Structures are given as structure tokens and as C-alpha cells.
Image: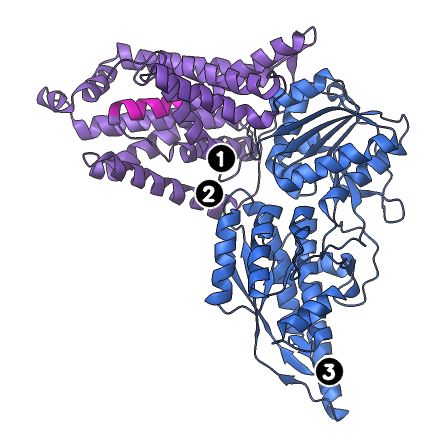
Chain colours: A purple, B blue
Amino acid sequence: MSLFVQQVILGLMLGGVYVAVAIGFSLVWGVLNIVNLAHGALVVVGMYATWFLFTHAGIDPFLTLPLDAVVLFAIGYLVQRGLINRVIRAPLFFTLLLTFGINLVLINLFLLWFKADFRSVTTSYSGAGLNVGAVTIPYIRLAALVIAMLLAGAVGFFMNRTRTGFAIQAVGADKDAAQLVGIDLRHVYALTFAVGAACAGVAGGLLSTVQAISPTAGEPYTLQAFVVVILGGLGRVSATVVGGLLFGLIEVLAQSQVPGLGAGWSNAIAFAVLVLVLVLRPQGLLGRLA
Amino acid sequence: MGGRIRGLMSGIAALSVLVACGGATGGGTTTTTGADIILGAPLSLTGSSSKEGGLAKQGYDMWQTWVNQQGGINVKGVKHKVQIKYADDQSKPDISAQLTQSLITDQKVQFLLGPYGSGPTASDAVIAEKNSIPMVEGNGAAQAIFSKGYKYTFGVLSPANKYLQGVIDLAATLNPKPSTIAMLAADDSFSQEVAAAVNDYAPGKGFSVVYNQKYPNGSTDVSSLVAAAKAKNPDILLNSGHLAEAIAINKAAKDLQLNAKLFAYSVGPSTPDFVNALGKDSYYVMDGSQWTPQVKYKPTFYLSVADYTAAYKSTFNTQEDPDYHVAESTAACLALQKAIENAGTVTNTDKVRDALASLDVMTFFGEIKFDNRGVNVTKPMVVEQIQTDGKHHTVFPSDVADKQVQYPTPPWSQR
């Protein structure tokens, strides 16, 4: 029983990481209609930024998160304004190709600058945790979950309570009408992508404390973000939160709790759930119908 | 330091010139220069194994520099310099096979050096066989590669089933004796062979495997498996997987306070990255290693173990010792060189293949001698441990060890 509780806790914590990764992805997809294949690489930029500040300036990884966000915001704004905006009105296929290309360029830049070495952020307090009976709650993973939730709350507030958020939503709903009322499309596009990238940066900073950092470490996260958004539904922060936590739980429990099946099946089970959701509720669990 | 090595290198160069001149003045065997020998090497320079692929390339490059400084491979008095054509297989077996074929067809390579990893090696072996081109490899240890009756693929490294056997043998000598094992294994063929061998071998040594779980290759989160292993309270935590997973498992073991007495991972701890990434958390961890800079083999040609280590540091301008991936890759080159010399031909690849099959040579990497499958079964694996001085030390078998094993591993809370 205590093992089950432990696994549920680990699942929620893993889910928290997925939420952090998927929020930015969902925003960009929902508003700009871009499936950003470079999202994982942006997460890795955040990882390296945190690693760099931790290793060379001795800054605590959690304190580097705002800096990651700022750096990625700037990168995101420039990438959208300078590159993606040029093909934004073209069919989906073109943005897919472009972001795929950006992903390759970023990965090869990482290889050039950081080599293929594996790195990690290991703090003095890593490994500390709260012990409740046989259940251990590692502080770092708990903090990652809390920060992911705060990030989700912040993005939700930004989207639903600020003028800029309304502008982004307006563009997402009808870009021609938004332009008619005086919203600068190119700026809002760039802003949206920048916020998405900033979220990816925070996610990367969080991930740097729990896993190894390498140029290709972001690859799985693009896929996972995609699955989380499909699972939860597009266009709402709360949907991403539910999708992320649920996907984390499913993965962990499938790894360890399904009798007779090894962890090798966890991906199969997680994706089977995804297919099931697509069949029964194509808009996602909490998604709005298009 | 660098100066001394350069001195050594130029000394070697001067010596080889002397030898060449000596041959000439002695009359009879004048050394002439023949056409370059072209070798092909598909390697994972990008993708999931790019780190290890880069290490393998270092090993190949070290030998290439050395052999060309000697004037090349000596085939019946004619020296042939060596070119190595690399192709980036992105760590993917199917791409590796395509590139191997294109190296043979388009680049006209005469012999193959292996890719990194059992997957790509297995798929490239098919191509080598089809084209009757000998492939000597140092980075594919799965026995599945050698169970198909191929005649052109030779592996200089100890096979997968031996990777963690040394650790088990070592554990059996420890006091207090550990008795239970938890095993986490990736689902690729190499890792599965390592795990299967542990499951077969450990009970005979008085251990019981209390947890044995497979996870998808390249998993980013293994904490739930570590939690499940912890629930079995194992004395020994084993992993057969890869560097990234070994780092993740070690982190999760600390996070979840899994206090085993012995931690050993098949791949990962031997690399400097593991220590750099984990700092003090990497201490006490062991791995089965193909080779360490401390082994005491007495080679009959190429560099001694100490010279090899020194040459590595000066060539790549680093303070790090060469890791075994580098050494086994160099060793593959040495086997090929010796076989070409023994065969006395560059063009007759079948003769070179036969020379490989009958090869028996002692190198800095250990003895290289293939069984009829092409597996090097004579060389033992060693166990190395990252000790509390932050360095790798060879701890088993005792005749090649340079330090006593540090055991038991203290609980995480007391480190």
C-alpha cells in the first residue's frame, strides 16, 4: 500500500514536470496554430542556462528560473518575429518544417558549444526529502511540482486577467477581427511565442535538477507535451494541468503497478489511453470544441 | 607535460625513421610507400549515443595518428598510410547500415571499423557480411551480433554477459556479504543480455534477485522503478543501461533514500561525465569495465598502458584519463592492423579475415583472440569504483587492482 502511495506521489511529481513543459507548447499551439517541434530544444536551453548559472556563478537552480524565463522570452520573441512570422499564414506543414529545422539547428549548436557531454545540477540539498512512514517525498521534485502549478496559475492569470492576455486570446479566436480593432498581429504572435518559450525555459530549469542534461535531452519532451495537450485539450491552462498530471500518473503506475507487464509497456499503455481519449472525446478531457 | 609527450612522439617518429633507414642500409628490405588503406567507420556523432560515439572516434583517431607517424601499416615491407572515412549514423541502426553500404560503394573503403553500440553493430554486420568486408569493432558487446554465423565481424571487447559478472564475483568476497540484488535494465539487446547473465549467474554465487525490471531504452524518468526496488530493500542495486539512465537512477536513489550497500551500473560510471554530473553522489559507485588505465597488461606492440594514457592526455589536451570506450576502439584498430600485417595483403580481404580469425596478440587493452563466432572471450572484465578521492580505481580482480574496494556504501544521510 505504501508503495502505491509512493508511486502516486511520484506520478504527480512527474506530471508536474509535464505540466511545466506542456503549458508553453499548448499556448503556442492554441493561439498561433503552430505545433512547435523545437519546444524540446527550448527546454534544453533552459537546462543549460540553469546549469551554467549554477556551475559558474553558484546561483541556486531555483533562483535561476526567472533568468531562464527572461532569456527564453527574448529568444522566443526573436525567433517568432524574425522567422516563424514569415510563414505563419502558410499551411501548417510549413511551420512544422520550420520548427523542425529550428530544432535541428539548436541541437547542433548545443553539440558545438557544450559537446555531447552529460551534465547535471547536483545541489547540496539534492536528495533531501520528507519521510512519512515508508513513503519518501523528495523536496526537489515537490518544489518542481509546486513551481509548475504556480507557473500554470501565472499563465492562467496572464491570459484571463490582463489586457495583453485578452489580446492574445482575441488573436487566437479571430485574427482578422483582432487586427480590425487595432491589435498588432506580428507583435502579439511574437509575444505569445515568447511566453511559450519562457515557460519552456522554466521547465528546463526544473528538469536540470532531476535528470541528466545533454543536447538531445529535450527530444522526448516535445512528444510528451504533444500528448499532454491532446489528452487535456487545447486552449485552456486547466486542461494542460489535468492532462499533465494524468499523463504522469498513468506513466508511473503503468511502469510499476500493472501486474504481469514490465515497465517496457508503460509507453504502450500511456498511448493506448491517448488513443482512447481521441476516440471517445476528441477535443480532449477539458478541451473546448473548436 | 605536453612538451614531454611531444618529445616522446617525435622520439617514436625519429625511431621509426631510424628503423626504416636501418632496413635500407642493411640492404635487402627497402621500405617503400604504398597506396593509402581506406577504412570506413559509421559512428554516432549525433543522437542518443553521441557521447560514446565521440569517445570511439577519439580511440580510432589516436591509432590513426600513431600508425601514420610510423609511416603506415607495414605489409611485406610496403608501408600503407591509413585514412578513416567517418559517417554520422545518428545513433540509429538503420541509418548506420545505409551509411555502411554507402561507405563501401561510394567511398570504396577496404575495411570497416565498427559503429558505437550493439544495435548499429548488429545491423552493420549484415552489410559487412553481404559485401565480404571484414569489420573489426570495439563497441558492440551483445552476443546476438555473433550468434548469426557471420564470418566477417570481429569484436575485441568482452561479451555482454561478462559486464556485471565481475561485480557479482567481487560482492561474493565482501564482508558483510550482501545477499539481495535489484536489477533495472533497459530494453535494448545489450542491456537485456547483461541483465539475463546476472539473473543466471547470481544465484550460483549465493545471491537472490529480488527485483528485476525492464524499462524503455532512453527513459527520462526512472523514479517509480527505483521506488519499487527500494520497497524490496536490496543490498545491491544494479543497472544495465546507459549513461543518462545511470545518472537518473543514481539521482532517484538519493531522492528516495534507497540505501543499498553496493551500487553498480554497467555503462556510465566509467565516464568522467558521471563524476562531473553527480559530484560526491557518484562516490562508491562501481561498474564493470572493459579496461581501466590501471590494468597491468604487457603488450607486444603499440603503446604500453601508461604511454597510451599519457598520449591520450596530450593528444586531446585533457587531464581526464581515457575511458574504456576510447581504449576498446583503439584496440579494434590494432587487431585490424595486426591482421593485415599477418595476412601480408591489403587487397585480399578474405585473407585478412582469416588472419583475424587466427589472431592472438597481447595489447595494452588485453589479449585479443577471437573464438569461432568472432567474440574475444580471452580478455577478462575488471571492476572499477569511484572512490572518495573522486577518482576511478580498479578494485577487482585483485591481481590488476590498484586499490581496495570501499565497502559498504554509507547511507545517503551519512555521506
Image coordinates for residue B295, horizontal then vertical, percent: 81, 52
Task: Please give the residue where the numbered disc 3 appears in the rendered image.
Answer: B18
Is residue B24 positioned above or below B245 on the image? below
Q: Residues within 10 Å of mark 2 (few under 14, many from 20)?
A: some
Count up the numbered dots: 3
Mark 3 element type: helix
Report the side of B298 relative to A82 (left or right). Answer: right
In the rendered structure, are the residues bearing label 2 and label 1 in contact, judged by CB atoms less than 8 Å apart? yes
- The foreground one among A69 and A83 is A83
Magenta extent = A22-31
Looking at marks 2 and 1 on the same chain, the residue that comes earlier in the sequence is marked by: 1
Amino acid type at image mark 1: Tyr
- Graded by Cα atoms within 10 Å as few (under 14), some (14 to 19) or many (20 or more), the crowding at tag 1 reads many
Q: Amino acid at mark 3?
A: Leu
Estimate the spatial distance between the alpha carbons at disc 3 and disc 1, rounded to whole Å: 52 Å
Residue drawn 42% across the image and 35% down it: A41
* Near-viewer residue (A58 or B400): B400
Query: Magenta stretch mostly in which secondary structure?
Result: helix
Instruction: For residue B88, say whether it is visible.
Output: no
Q: Is residue A100 visible?
A: yes
Q: Quadrant of the C terminus of chain A?
A: top left
Report the chain holding disc 2: A
Is A42 inside the magenta-drawn segment?
A: no
Q: Which residue is mark 1?
A: A48
Q: Which residue is mark 2?
A: A110
Percent across and percent down for residue B254 are: 67, 22
Q: Label 2 to label 1, Cα distance in Å?
A: 9 Å
The amino acid sitting under disc 2 is: Phe
On screen, residue B392 versus residue A201, left or right, reads right
- Viewed as shown, does residue A101 lie left or right of B382? left
Residue at the (32%, 11%) spot, across then down: A157
